[in-house]
Each structure stands twice: as C-alpha cells, then as structure tokens.
C-alpha cells in the first residue's frame, strides 16, 4: 500500500492535533503492543505512536517492524513520535 502525496499531506494536517494513543514500553515491540496498535488502527485509521528507543537505528528498526506487522503506512516520523495510517476494512 502506498499513500499518494496529496493524501499524505491531508493526513499530516489531520494528525497534527492528535496525541499518541500507544506508547512502546521498556520491552520494545511486544505482541501486546502490536495488538493495541492494530486495535487503534481498526477504530481510527490514523494514529500516533510514541516509540521509546534511545538510538536512532533501534528506533528505525522498531518503526519498520510496526509498519510491517500491522500493514500500516508510515505517514510521518518526528523524533520519537510516528504517525501511521491503515485504511479501514469496510
């Protein structure tokens, strides 16, 4: 799934006022965290997640894992906060 530029801009603007709904803990990306992300995406389509990792490489790996395992598209990443989108199944 690839989000077009116009939709990406719209989603960034829409996500501006959102707060992170899932925060990764000290244990990283666990099945429980992925379950919560999937549940939030099912309900909202567009969410923010706080990825707690000290090193940039570790954070990038966690972001890639989240996007891969949830089939979500990364819209934006600023610091520790990522915005992801997955179209709802209708």
Image (spheres, rainbow, N blue to C red):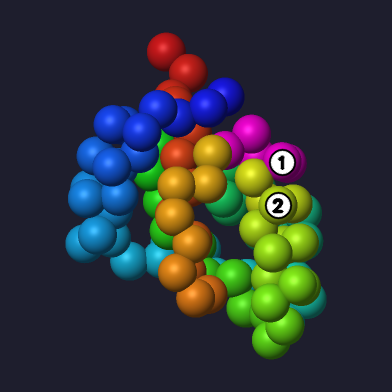
Magenta-highlighted residues: 68-72
Q: Are marks 2 and 1 in contact (CB under 8 Å)?
A: yes
Looking at the picture, tell me which residue is in the foreground, 90 or 86.
86
Residue 88 x/y as whole percent: 44, 25
Residue lying farthest bottom? 54
Above or below residue 81? Residue 88 is above
Q: Residue at x 41, y 66 (%)?
A: 20
Q: Dot 2 lies on which element?
A: helix
Q: Residue at x 49, y 33 (%)?
A: 86
Above or below residue 40? Residue 33 is below
User: Magenta stretch: residue 69 in it?
Assistant: yes
Task: From the image, give the main secondary structure of the stretch colored magenta.
Answer: helix
- Which mark, by number, is residue 68? 1
Query: Local crowd at mark 2 within 10 Å, few (<14), some, or many (≥20)?
Result: some
Q: Residue at x 64, y 34 (%)?
A: 71
Q: Dot 1 lies on which element?
A: helix
Which residue position holds label 2? Answer: 64
Residue 82 x/y as whole percent: 49, 61
Q: Residue at x 52, y 46 (%)?
A: 74
The C terminus is located in which quarter?
A: top left
């Amino acid at each position: 799934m690839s989000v077009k530029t116009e939709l990406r801009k719209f989603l960034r603007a829409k996500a501006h006022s959102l707060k992170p709904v899932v925060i990764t803990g000290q244990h990283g990306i666990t099945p429980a965290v992925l379950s919560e992300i999937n549940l939030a995406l099912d309900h909202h389509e567009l969410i923010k997640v706080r990825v707690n990792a000290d090193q940039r490489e570790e954070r990038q790996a966690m972001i890639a894992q989240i996007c891969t395992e949830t089939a979500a598209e990364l819209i934006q990443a600023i610091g520790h906060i990522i915005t992801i989108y997955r179209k709802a199944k209708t």
